[in-house]
Amino acid sequence: MIKSTLEQVISEDLAEIWSILDNEEKRLVIDNFIIHEFKKNQIIYAEGESPEFLWCLLKGKVKKFKDGIGGRQQILRLHRPVQYFGYRAYFAKERYVSSAAAFEPSTIGAVPLKLVEDLIHKNINLAWFFIHELSRNLGGSDEKIVNLTQKHIRGRLAEALIILKDSYGYEDDESTLRIYMAREDLANLSNMTTSNAIRTLTSFVNEKIIAVDGRRIKIINEQMLRKISKFG
Amino acid sequence: MIKSTLEQVISEDLAEIWSILDNEEKRLVIDNFIIHEFKKNQIIYAEGESPEFLWCLLKGKVKKFKDGIGGRQQILRLHRPVQYFGYRAYFAKERYVSSAAAFEPSTIGAVPLKLVEDLIHKNINLAWFFIHELSRNLGGSDEKIVNLTQKHIRGRLAEALIILKDSYGYEDDESTLRIYMAREDLANLSNMTTSNAIRTLTSFVNEKIIAVDGRRIKIINEQMLRKISKFG
DNA sequence: ATACCTTTGTGCTATAAAACATATTTGTCA
DNA sequence: TGACAAATATGTTTTATAGCACAAAGGTAT
């Protein structure tokens, strides 16, 4: 990708951070911004590695997950364009405690975290950007803990579907989730076995709360789904 | 408490933040620092409230928790002196998603978050302090999600005991946990019912991994406990 | 098109943990 | 000190969900 196009992509898509930086800072970012293409299911970074880059998802979908006991995977967070990730471990001076992978073919920019650190030192607004992001994520994690530990299967799956809707939205029909994922990933998102994800999905279909066509999921009764998510 | 004493307490105990601030900033903090005494089990702030103060635990023990389904409580985090809490929601521009309560009689300082915000704007090192804290907490939350969802009861309780040890340490005998908590709280920490916390504690005693005398818990075989925590 | 592998779907069984019931002990306050 | 409430302890029952087995459907590579 040639620089003029890159600059355009960055300035168009990175709006939030972009508006924070002055011209000199923008130049620094552009000169150090490397765009990567990831294939479906390709690992971006893995648990245990040292954080090196701030990743910026420009196109596609990314999951952050942790491999747990008995090969079971827990999906911790989903990312959509334009979101930043991969910086937490660096700021905590730790190695990654989770892994990131592309859910579908994705275009992701990488900026050296050392550069980000330098920019933060000089630009308090960038510091605030990360304080804000980290704070929101931490609140989300705390909510997730209660969701995953206290709700029953139906509640957890309903919650997962709501999260998918909130993360990626609907297609033009205003009801089909704009993400197609395997039943296994749905299970990993909602802390259950694949069989139970399939089963519970089937009962939601029978109850006319959703409709399913392969991996296309149509939310018919979002209100009911939220209700199940809340009390189930 | 008179100001000279207060100043002394602050400068002695708030070392980490204190060394970050210059003299003028220190003065501002001292002038706006209000010390509160909390009784055992007293609520410091509750879920849903608007964050107003940065709390600084000077003496005592504090738990952060979320009330979930069917009156069940999940303990999310434990605090020891000198730790800061109550700021996440403010930085996220949200209301509190969890509550904080004193585990035992506690002395806690309160600084208006607006002042903290102003200080951060002027002092990048304070910004870094919070970026670092938030990042570490977020990593901890992500770990906790897998611990609580994928481990069995024995593993979860073992994990909880390890957390207690890491948070509050041992007494002079190098084996008795320096915190006495109800079985119910132990259960709330490790996502199980009180009965099961009691039962599992009993089996640990029978297996000579711990010894129990009322609420005093003595870790006899920490190695084994870590092993159970890891694979259970 | 064929063969093969992966994903989806469904029924059955096993089991971990909750729910319930009921003592027993401990702590607290009049 | 006695009375009452709260916390701890333990046994039994119930249930949600994991685990397993197997069939059908869908993709993919040759």
Image: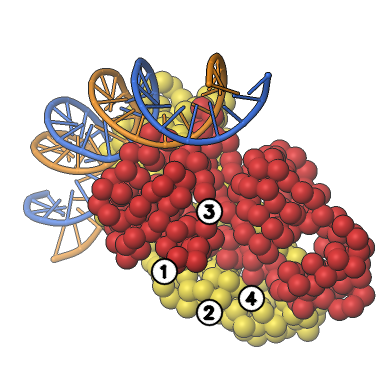
Chain colours: A red, B yellow, C orange, D blue
Q: Are marks 4 and 1 in contact (CB under 8 Å)?
A: no
Q: Is residue A115 left or right of residue A224?
A: right
Question: Real-space Cα distance between discs 3 and 4?
Answer: 60 Å
Residue at the (57%, 66%) spot, across then down = A136
Return the x and y of residue B158 as percentages of the image width and height.
47, 34
- Residue B156 is labelled as none
Question: Real-space Cα distance between discs 2 and 1?
Answer: 13 Å
Question: Which residue was labeled with disc 2?
Answer: B52
The answer to which of C24 and B45 lies nearer the viewer is: B45
Where A36 falls versus B81 (above or below)?
above
Question: Real-space Cα distance between discs 4 and 1?
Answer: 33 Å
Question: Real-space Cα distance between discs 2 and 3?
Answer: 39 Å
Protein chain holding label 2: B
Question: Which residue was labeled with disc 1?
Answer: B47
For the N terminus of chain A, the image quarter is: bottom right
Classify 10 Å Cα crowding around label 1: few (below 14), some (14-19), many (20 and above).
some
The answer to which of A77 and B29 lies nearer the viewer is: A77
Label whose residue precedes the other's in the sequence (4 or 1): 4
Instruction: Tell me the quarter of the picture where residue A197 sits.
Output: top left
Classify 10 Å Cα crowding around label 4: few (below 14), some (14-19), many (20 and above).
few
Label whose residue precedes the other's in the sequence (2 or 1): 1
The answer to which of B52 and A127 lies nearer the viewer is: A127
- Residue B5 is labelled as 4
Under tag 3, what secondary structure? loop
Q: Is residue B112 left or right of residue B203?
A: right
Label 1 sits on what residue type? Glu
Question: Which residue was labeled with disc 3?
Answer: A179
Q: Is residue B82 in view?
A: no
Label whose residue precedes the other's in the sequence (2 or 4): 4
